[in-house]
Amino acid sequence: MIRHLVLPGLLGETEGVLAFIARELSRNSYLNLMDQYHPCYRAAEYPPLDRVLDKHEYQQALAMAKHNGLHRLDRRQRVF
């Protein structure tokens, strides 16, 4: 299983990670896209890390995974 923490405002980084997984590892990798980021110690000094991930960003990350052919996604649901 590969776990990737999706960070607020950094979906470009997530896109790169997902493309790497699909290209260099396997599109059959079991993937957990984690949405649990929570700002804490001095996060206010580092926007956009000063907020939680919003529902739209997480949905975009899921769409990116599918776009890259990653289909074995952990299906736990977050309540926003």
Image (tube, rainbow, N blue to C red):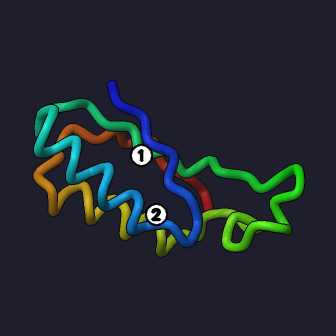
Question: Residue at label 2?
Answer: 58
**At x 39% / y 38%, what residue is drawn?**
32
**At x 12% / y 34%, what residue is drawn?**
26
Check disc 1 and report its element: helix, strand or loop.
strand
Q: In the rendered image, which quarter contains the C terminus?
A: bottom right
Question: Residue at label 1?
Answer: 33
Q: Position of residue 14 (x, y in %)?
A: 39, 57
Q: In the rendered image, which quarter contains the N terminus?
A: top left
Q: Which mark is residue 48?
A: none
**At x 13% / y 37%, what residue is drawn?**
24
Q: Is residue 58 left or right of residue 21?
A: right
Q: Is residue 45 left or right of residue 34?
A: right
**At x 15% / y 63%, what residue is drawn?**
67
Q: Position of residue 16 (x, y in %)?
A: 30, 57
Tell me if residue 42 comes above or below residue 24 in the rendering: below
What's under tag 1, amino acid-wise? Answer: Leu
What's under tag 2, amino acid-wise? Answer: Tyr
- 40 and 58: which is toward the camera: 40
Sequence-wise first label, 2 or 1: 1
Q: Position of residue 44 (x, y in %)?
A: 85, 67
Tell me if residue 1 comes above or below residue 43 in the rendering: above
- Calculate the distance from the C-alpha at mark 2 to the C-alpha at mark 1: 8 Å
Q: Quadrant of residue 76?
A: top left
In the image as oriented, which residue stretches furthest toward the right? 41
Q: Position of residue 7 (x, y in %)?
A: 56, 58
Check disc 2 and report its element: helix, strand or loop.
helix
- 24 and 33: which is toward the camera: 24
Label 1 CA crowd tier, 10 Å (few <14, some 14–19, many 20+): many
